[in-house]
Image (cartoon, rainbow, N blue to C red):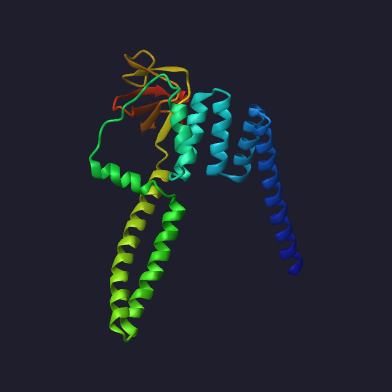
Amino acid sequence: MIRRIALLMMTLVLTLAASAQSKEEADNLYKKEKYEAAAKAYEAILSRDGVSSAIYYNLGNCYYKLDNVPQSILNYERALLLDPGDGDIRANLALARGKTTDKVTPPSEMFFVTWWHDLANTMSLSAWSTLAIGAFVLMLIGLLVYMFVGELLYRKIGLYGAFVLLAVVLIANCAAYSQHQRIGQHDAAIVIAPAVSVKSSPNESSTDLFLIHEGSKVQILDATMKNWREVKFEEGKQGWVPTETIETI
């Protein structure tokens, strides 16, 4: 039994060491301006170890240096999905979007909706969850102080503190739920083809509605057709595009 545990621990250590070494090698390739090789190394890490905000961010940087705008935007968006509060990701994504052909102005929304989205995106899902758990524990401590401490001042602090922490728990849980829903939807995509004629129906012979270019972000409305996707663009227009022209974030 002990031998099995030791073997398992050794395997885990070697795996973590190999992962760190691979990332270090990829980082070194990037520093040496070997961007294609670095991109392949980062993609190998993602295939082996799973999703990572930091790796997606580095991969986006590689594609940005290679002037591959749609792939840089795609990977920045994937990084932002996992870590929406990272200012560096947002800044680089804005730079990459500045190089796209289509300059889109999203439709306006109610101020409180914008405010809530901005608040929820200040931290990642794990950070909001940690905050919710921490605030809940402190709230229980405040209630215990209120119930069992004799001095009036401490009882007031415990009670009022518990109410404040209850509000923090509710906000953090709502924000965490919002983040979880956003990550799990898989209904956003980036146009990766140089240019796409958006159709009125899922058929090559149907009417061309408008032209969209690489790097544009879309919301997938209908994914039931094998070779077509109905999509909605950030400015509100919608139509059908071939499946291979977009890639899901």
Most foreground residue, 135 or 209: 135
Q: Position of residue 32 (x, y in %)?
A: 68, 31
What residue do we see at 42% from left, 50% from top? 123
Total number of numbered labels?
0
Residue furthest to the front: 153
Can residue 249 be seen?
Answer: no
Most foreground residue, 200 or 155: 155
Can residue 27 be seen?
Answer: yes
Does 123 sit above or below residue 69?
below
Q: Position of residue 222 (x, y in %)?
A: 35, 32
What residue do we see at 47% from left, 45% from top? 83
Q: Position of residue 62 (x, y in %)?
A: 58, 30
Most foreground residue, 111 or 71: 111
What residue do we see at 31% from left, 82% from top? 147
Does 109 sit above or below residue 100?
below
Q: Position of residue 146 (x, y in %)?
A: 31, 79
- Quarter occupied by the N terminus: bottom right
Residue furthest to the right: 3
Q: Which quarter of the figure has residue 246?
A: top left
Q: Which quarter of the figure has residue 205?
A: top left
